[in-house]
Image: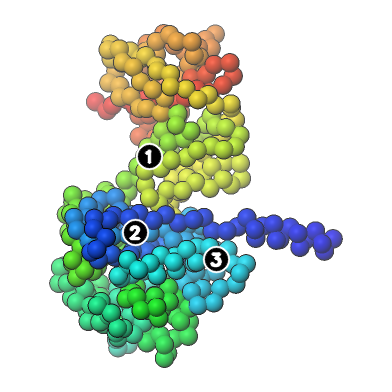
Amino acid sequence: MRFFIIVFFSFIQLFALNTPFDIYKKDTNPTQHTLLIIGGIHGDEPGGYFAPAVLEKYYKIKSGNLWIIPNLNVDSIMANNRGIYGDMNRKFNVIDKNDNDLLTVNRIKEIILDKRVDLILNLHDGFGFYRNIYEDANFNPNAWGQATIIDQEKIDDKFGNLDEIAKQVNKMVNNEGLYQDFHTFGVKNTQTKQKDEQMQQSLTFFAVTHNKPAFAIETSKNITELTYKVIYQLKSMEEFMKIMNIEFERDFDLNNYEEVKSRIYDFGKIKINDNISLDLSDLKNNLRFVPLKKEGNKFDFTHTLSKVKYNDNKYEIYVGNIKVCDLYPQIFEVANTEDKIKILVDNKELETSFGNQIDIKNDFKILKSDLRVNIIGFSKDGLDNEDEILIKRSDIQDIYSIDNNKTKYRAEFYKDGKFYGMIVLNFLKD
Ligand SMILES: [Zn+2]
């Protein structure tokens, strides 16, 4: 009996390795400075990973180089947990060879030590509001929020004046306009080498002891509005880029709350097996009978924080720590096809391929092909194939919509028991 228990546990451990993180390199000139941004070392600190996701998607680098890892601790982000395999930020000095974070930690160490990397930022949301003198339980020297963290005053490097640089960054961020006066940033020097044994295990201390300038940026966990945190993180990162002569462009106003918010919550799309495509921003939180393969389904995303986890007979779709949808599969053989479908949309004939969405004002009719059509939520007695029927929105039961606004519906195509693909029917609002 004992033998079986041991085997069972080592089996779990073997397959519980943290999901590999992603790295995005915005290189313009390898001889110029390179800033490495690391988000998501702690899975329950969304400011620390949604900010680099916005940076990756909406910033264009004009000179210098920016490397972005938005999701270091992938499994913990999906679980909205500081560290489901323990605190990853305490594994950079000593790590057990069976640790589930071992590959992640080794891989990020290698990137930190890459000779092209000039400076490293590790992004967090921390408790309270850092102040250098005690004010109360939330505002005091033991708090971590709204602070730029350094391990020591300086190291010997061109960006080695850690204290000076951190002060300069904070000054700019504080002067640029805070949402509340008490959101002001300070420099917290943990004096890691002398005073903080815990932090001697941290990512930034690993970097600093290898003579790489490193800082942590901490927005406050006590600020519950994600948009504020993302704005503060981005402002800090922008100041570091300016100090490093990394020129950038963005297509929005960082002081405009709504513009930033709409970018944070644009979750993009998921494409499945190249024949289904769904908008994640307005998707319902569960979809049933989605035609998928038994195994080996391919999921592609446009958002850097999107991941899928198979759990309890369903696919869970995440953007960061936000579970967007539970997708319940219905198993089919899936055909690989470039077939085009002809549809009459508002009296005009058009041709489209699987995985597309078509916009409809009034009505549509899917024209005859050798495929069987199933429009989910539409039914007419005695009909198995729903092509060659003029259909308007009121002909489809709206509980079958795939979006919360009840405007998008599924048309699915089959032949000989195989699933060929889906087209999303999007009824435009009047
Ligand atoms: Zn943290």
How many C-alpha atoms fall within 10 Å of the one at disc 2: few (<14), some, or many (≥20)? many
Q: Which mark is residue 68?
A: 2
Where in the figure is residue 380, as x and y percent of width and height?
49, 12
Instruction: Please report whichever mark, 1 or 2, sits nearer to the chain's N-terminal start.
Output: 2
Distance between the alpha carbons at the discs numbered 1 and 2: 21 Å
Q: Amino acid at mark 2?
A: Ile
Instruction: Please report whichever mark, 2 or 3, sits nearer to the chain's N-terminal start.
Output: 2
Q: How many marks?
A: 3
Cβ(mark 3) to ligand 1 < 8 Å?
no
Which quadrant, please, contains the C terminus?
Answer: top left
- For the point 22% across and 81% down, the residue is 164
Q: Is residue 401 visible?
A: no
Which quadrant, please, contains the N terminus?
Answer: bottom right
How many C-alpha atoms fall within 10 Å of the one at disc 1: few (<14), some, or many (≥20)? some
Q: Secondary structure at mark 2?
A: strand
Q: Amino acid at mark 1?
A: Lys
Q: Quadrant of residue 257?
A: bottom left
For marks 1 and 2, give the one nearer the viewer: 2
**Which residue is label 3 attached to?**
102
Distance between the alpha carbons at the discs numbered 2 and 3: 20 Å
The residue nearer to you, when weighing 245 against 225, is 245
- For the point 58% across and 47% down, the residue is 311
Q: Is residue 207 visible?
A: yes
Q: Secondary structure at mark 1?
A: strand
- For the point 80% across and 58% down, the residue is 4
Distance between the alpha carbons at the discs numbered 1 and 3: 31 Å
Where in the figure is residue 128, as x and y percent of width and height?
35, 75
Q: Amino acid at mark 3?
A: Leu
**Which residue is label 1 attached to?**
269
